[in-house]
Amino acid sequence: IVNNVKAYLAIYVLIILASTFIVSFDNFDFTTNLTAVLATFNNIGPGLNVVGPTGNFAGFSVLSKCVLIFDMLAGRLEIMPILVLFSKSTWMRAR
């Protein structure tokens, strides 16, 4: 159980860091980028600064919006099923 929790936490942190890195190419401040990713990944509502309660995600690029959509799906459906869906070995067994 401990190893499964460690793996889940590692994947969780890795997705947050990678998503924040990709979203940061839009030249918003760090708080906006991080809270946009956290708000979508954890499904918690508004973030801070540009994506705050009176803002929206319209200023983000298409790439950033795709990353945030992935974060929303991974957060809502859980991380492991999404990773299994994108795993090559899952599709190789289906043949």
Image: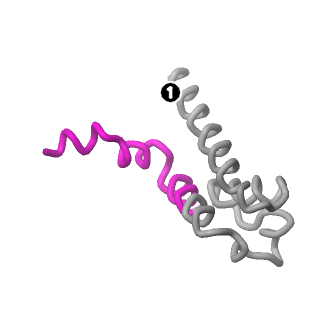
Residue 81 picture location, percent across and down: 41, 46
As displayed, is residue 57 above or below residue 41? below
Rendered location of residue 71, percent (x, y): 57, 56
User: In the figure, is residue 70 to the left or right of 18?
Assistant: left
Q: Residue visible at 68% across and 56% down?
A: 23
Q: Position of residue 91 (x, y in %)?
A: 24, 45
* Residue 94 located within the stretch drawn in magenta: yes
Asked which quadrant contains residue 87, the reply is: top left
In the image, 5 versus 62, the foreground residue is: 62
Task: State the residue in front, 91 or 52.
Answer: 91
**Quarter of the view holding residue 42:** bottom right
- Please name the predominant secondary structure of the magenta segment in the image: helix
Give the crowd class for mark 1: few <14, some 14-19, many >=20 residues within 10 Å: few
Seen from the viewer's position, the closer of residues 9 and 26 is 26
Vertical placement of 16 versus 54: above or below?
A: above
Q: Quadrant of residue 37?
A: bottom right
Residue lying furthest left in this view?
A: 95
40 displayed left or right of 56: left
Q: Label 1 belongs to which residue?
A: 4
Q: Could you tell me which secondary element the residue under label 1 belongs to? A: helix
Residue under the image location 81 percent in, 62 percent down: 28
Taking the magenta stretch, the answer to whether it contains residue 40 is no
Answer above or below: position of 21 versus 25: above
Inspect the image, locate mark 1, and give the three-letter code of the amino acid beneath it. Asn
Magenta stretch bounds: 69-95
Residue 62 is situated, as x and y percent measured from the top left of the image, at: 59, 69
